Amino acid sequence: MANILIVDDSRTSRKILRSILESAGHTIVGEAANGEEGAKLFDELNPDLVTLDITMPVLDGIGALQKIKESHPNSKAIMVTAAGQKTKMVEAVKFGADEFIPKPFEPEKLVAIVEKIIG
Ligand SMILES: [Mg+2]
C-alpha cells in the first residue's frame, strides 16, 4: 500500500481520486490544488507516489513534475490527462512521468496502474 499525494485544481477530481485510492487501501497523505503547492508538499511529505493533473493554475503538472523529479529522482508520478493533451504527454515523458491516467477516471484501471508502479 502506498502513501499518495494528489495534485489537481479540481476539487471534484481530488475527491474522486481520494475515494478510489482509499478504497483500494492506499493512504492519501496530502492534496494540493496547483503544481507549486504540490511540489512543496512533495518535499514535506515524501510520498511513494504523486498524481499530477496536467492543466492547473500557477504551475501546471509538467512544471510540477520537472521540479519533483529534479529534487527527487526516484519519485513516482502519474499524470492525469484530458482529451487532446498528446503534446503535453510527450513533454511529460521527457521529464520522467511514470504513467498516465485519463479523465474521467476508471477506478480499476487507476488502481492497476498504481499497483504496477509501486509493485
Ligand atoms: Mg485541471
Image (cartoon, helix red, strand yellow):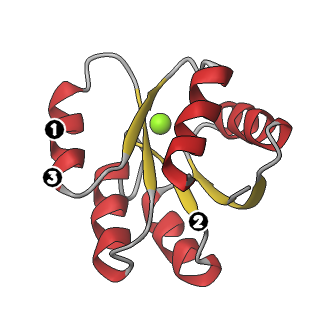
Left or right of residue 76, residue 14 in this image: right
* Quadrant where the N terminus is found in the figure: bottom right
CB of mark 3 within 8 Å of CB of mark 1? yes
Depicted 64 relative to depicted 57: above or below: below
Left or right of residue 17, residue 74 in this image: left
Mark 3 burial class by Cα count in 10 Å: few <14, some 14-19, many 20+: few
Picture quarter containing residue 71? Answer: bottom left
Left or right of residue 53, residue 22 in this image: right
Q: Which residue is mark 3?
A: 94
Mark 2 burial class by Cα count in 10 Å: few <14, some 14-19, many 20+: some
Q: Which residue is mark 2?
A: 48
Q: In the rendered structure, which amino acid carries the disc numbered 3?
A: Lys
Depicted 59 relative to depicted 93: above or below: below
Depicted 63 relative to depicted 99: above or below: below
Q: CA distance from mark 3 to mark 1?
A: 7 Å
What label does residue 108 carry, if any?
Answer: none
Estimate the x, y position of residue 83 in percent, counting from the top left. Answer: 34, 16
Q: Residue at x 55, y 59 (%)?
A: 49
Q: In the rendered structure, which amino acid carries the disc numbered 2?
A: Asp
Estimate the x, y position of residue 45 in percent, counting from the top left. Answer: 64, 77
Left or right of residue 33, residue 15 in this image: right
Tell me if residue 32 can be seen. no
Secondary structure under badge 1? helix
Q: Which residue is mark 1?
A: 90
Secondary structure under badge 2? loop
Q: CA distance from mark 1 to mark 2?
A: 23 Å
Q: Between 114 and 54, which is closer to the camera in this rendering?
A: 114
Q: In the rendered structure, which amino acid carries the disc numbered 1?
A: Val
Work out whether mark 1 precedes mark 2 in sequence or the reverse, and give the earlier one.
2
